[in-house]
Amino acid sequence: MNKPIGYWIKRLDAALEVQLDSTLARIKLSRRQWQTLNTLAEGALHPDQLEEILQPFWGGDVRLRERELAALVGRGMITMVDDRLTLSERGREKHHEAQRLVEAARQDLSIGIGIDEYAMALSVLERMSLNAERLAR
């Protein structure tokens, strides 16, 4: 198929959404909740910092962000310590469980794709994204 890159990016994104949602549903997490846990697994963040990091995933949907964060707080997975959001012990356990599932899914998604090919694809997409953002200014 001779389709433009935008076609493949949108198709891949949609397929990844469905696949990852299905994978994470097995442990009662949404993709946005997983992204939040995965980000906080690297360290506690001020809510504004978390919002900035996750902006590409949240888009401008404030209600979605609030609903997903409230669900993680309500389930005891994230907590506030010294004005920073952090994973609780339960959140760390859920993150590890999800990490194993996500890694297995990534391996399945990468069948037939070499490490160098994957790295090149990421590099090209990053440069194209930066170029597009620069041109949009």
Image (spheres, rainbow, N blue to C red):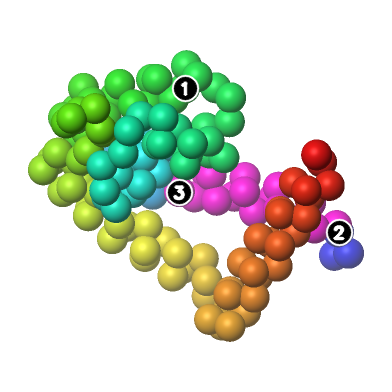
In the displayed structure, does residue 53 sit left or right of residue 88? right
Identity, as a three-letter code, of the amino acid under mark 2: Lys
Seen from the viewer's position, the closer of residues 99 and 132 is: 132
Seen from the viewer's position, the closer of residues 125 and 19 is: 125
Which region of the structure is painted magenta?
A: 4-21
Tag 3's secondary structure? helix
Task: Classify the position of the N terminus by image quarter.
Answer: bottom right
Residue 135 point in image, percent of width and height: 83, 47
Residue found at x 62% / y 48%: 13
In the displayed structure, does residue 28 sit left or right of residue 15? left
Identity, as a three-letter code, of the amino acid under mark 1: Leu
Q: Label 2: how many residues lie within 10 Å, few (<14), some (14-19) or many (20+)?
A: few
Q: Is residue 26 visible?
A: no
Q: Label 1 belongs to which residue?
A: 64
Q: Label 3 belongs to which residue?
A: 20
Tag 1's secondary structure? helix
In the displayed structure, does residue 106 sit left or right of residue 118? left
Task: Classify the position of the C terminus by image quarter.
Answer: top right
Of labels 3 and 1, earlier in sequence is 3
Q: Is residue 83 above or below residue 57?
A: above
Residue 136 point in image, percent of width and height: 82, 41
Q: Label 1: how many residues lie within 10 Å, few (<14), some (14-19) or many (20+)?
A: few
Residue found at x 32% / y 33%: 46
Question: How many angstroms separate mark 2 from mark 3 (CA)?
Answer: 24 Å
Asked whether residue 123 is drawn in magenta, I would say no
